[in-house]
Amino acid sequence: MSEEVIVNDVDAHHVFDVGRAKIEVVPLKGLPVVAPAVIFVALSIGFNWQWGLMFNHVVGGGLWTGIDLFVGLVIGPILGRLSIPSRAEFSARFMPKMVIIMPTVVMMTLATGFQVARNAGNLAVSNPNHAWLIVSFCVVGVMATIALGVLEPANIAVLYEMNKPVPNGERIGRLMKRFIYTAGITGVMQIATLIIMTRLGSR
């Protein structure tokens, strides 16, 4: 029978199994998938390859939008109703994948999006799409800051905490609440992004 330790939550004590396997914070198996994406983006920008730029921007943006909407509006509310041990178990399987996926899709979207806008002339102040583009820069900038400056650190902190011999249940719960709230915010902001992008595409 595996040894168990008791950690404190805000309201109660929860049991964590310290005999569990260590969580891989950065899943190394995902790196061979990320590397070609980074190279593809670099080559598309370096050679100003229009199809490559558009492919990376559309695919990266579509994945970013879809993930944020699903995590923020579907996964987030479900996690909010789970017990701390259940959230921790879900996080152990889900968050390492997000550590790899989110920086990759954000990089694909933003790096190529600027180049696409420049090639289309949308950066010129006289362009009728310029105002919409500036609004999109503001919205996407806030989302990228939340994704890479709040969600990713919270994800990694939860995984490191869970790898400790005696995980702090209260800290895990606090970090998971941060994840749930910020995921909800980015999910709602992605709706604004969809409105802006479809507006730009229809002009």
Image: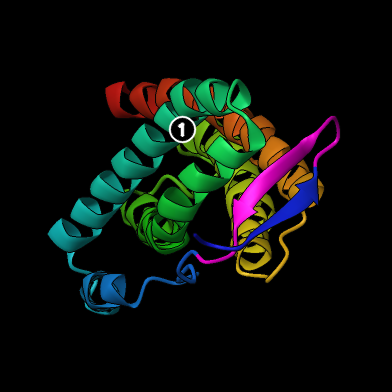
- The residue depicted at 64 percent of the width and 68 percent of the height is 160
| Residue 191 seen | yes
Q: Is residue 180 inside the magenta stretch? A: no
Quarter that holds the C terminus: top left
Q: Which residues are magenta?
A: 9-19
Q: Position of residue 88 (x, y in %)?
A: 57, 46
| Residue 134 seen | no
Residue 200, by quadrant, is top left
Pick the front one: 18 or 138: 18
- The residue depicted at 58 percent of the width and 26 percent of the height is 82
Q: Position of residue 138 (x, y in %)?
A: 63, 41
Number of numbered discs present?
1
Pick the front one: 157 or 111: 157
- The residue depicted at 32 percent of the width and 48 percent of the height is 120
Residue 134, by quadrant, is top right
Q: What residue would you read off at disc 1?
A: 71
Work out which residue is located at the far left of the displayed protein and give it.
51
Residue 17, by quadrant, is bottom right
Q: Position of residue 187 (x, y in %)?
A: 52, 28
Indicate left or right for 33 with 1 as reference.
left
Q: Amino acid at mark 1?
A: Val
Colour scheme shown: rainbow
Pick the front one: 154 or 113: 154
Q: Dot 1: what SS?
A: helix
Q: Is residue 10 inside the magenta stretch? A: yes
Pick the front one: 71 or 109: 71
- The residue depicted at 19 percent of the width and 53 percent of the height is 55
Q: Is residue 64 above or below residue 12?
A: below
Q: Is residue 22 above or below residue 136?
A: below
Indicate left or right for 173 with 77 as reference.
right
Q: Is residue 99 above or below residue 123?
A: below
Q: Position of residue 106 (x, y in %)?
A: 44, 55
